[in-house]
Image: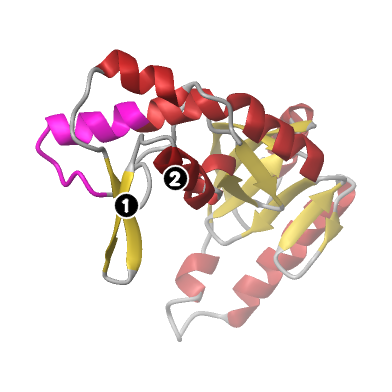
Amino acid sequence: MEKFKEIYFYIQTKVYKANTDERADPEIAQRFYEETREIFWNLGFTLGRDYALKENSCLQIGVMTFRGNLKEALIPEVEQALKTAETFRYSHYNDYGDTFLLSETEQETYFQDHLADYEKEVLETFKSCRDKGLDPWMDRPLITLESDIVLCRGYHTENLYLKRFPEVAADMEEKGLLIQKVKNGKPVYSLPKPKSRSSILKAAGKSYR
C-alpha cells in the first residue's frame, strides 16, 4: 500500500484566455507547455501528453491547475519549482486528503475487513434521508462515507466501496437491510419497513459471504 495526497496546484496564466479567444497568440500556449514540461522534467518526472509522472505520483497538466496524486514529500519541491515560472503565476495548492495505491489483494482485504462498518454508515445515510423527508430511494449513498477508502488511479481517484456498491447492496439485500426496485432501468435501494435501530445495526455487522 502506498499513500499519496490528492493535490491541486492552482495557477494563473494567459493560456486559459488563449484557449477561448481566437485572436490570442498561439505562441502563448506553446511557451506555457514548453516551460511546464521543462519544470517537471527537471524535478525528475517523465512526461506524457497531459501528465507528469514520477514513480507512482502523477499530476495532470492543465491550464488552470496541476492536479493529481502526489507523494507528500514531493509537495514542497513541486511548489517551489512552480514559483519560479515565467509563463504563469503560481497561486496556492489545496490538499484534498489521502489517497492510496493498493494491490488487488490489498483492495479485497480492505473491502472485507471494513464492510460491516461501511454497511452501518450506509444504513445511517439512508435513515437520515428518510427522516429529512428526502427521496428514500437511491442508487448509492449521496456522500462519501468515512469508512470508504480513496484509491489512486493515475491523476484520478475513485472510492472503493462506491465503485463496488452494487456488490455491497446485493449483500445488504440478502441480509434484509435494503430493498430494491428498478427505476428508469436502473436499480435503486431503500430501507425496508422501519424496525428497531439496534436490530438493523446488529445485522449490518454480519460477515460478508
Q: Position of residue 84 (x, y in %)?
A: 71, 43
Residue at 32 percent of width and 71 percent of height: 185
Please identify the quadrant where the N terminus is shown.
top right
Task: For label 1, count other residues whose C-alpha is less than 10 Å away and answer few (under 14), some (14-19) or many (20+).
Answer: some
How far apart marks 1 and 2 lie (CA) works out to 9 Å
Taking the image as drawn, is residue 103 in sight? no
| Amino acid type shown at disc 2 | Ala
Residue bearing the label numbered 2? 169
Please identify the quadrant where the C terminus is shown.
top right
Labels 1 and 2 touching (C-beta < 8 A) = yes
Q: Quadrant of residue 48?
A: bottom right
Disc 1, SS: strand
- Tell whether position 136 is magenta: yes
Residue bearing the label numbered 1? 180
Task: For label 2, count other residues whose C-alpha is less than 10 Å away and answer few (under 14), some (14-19) or many (20+).
Answer: many
Residue 205's label in the rendered image is none
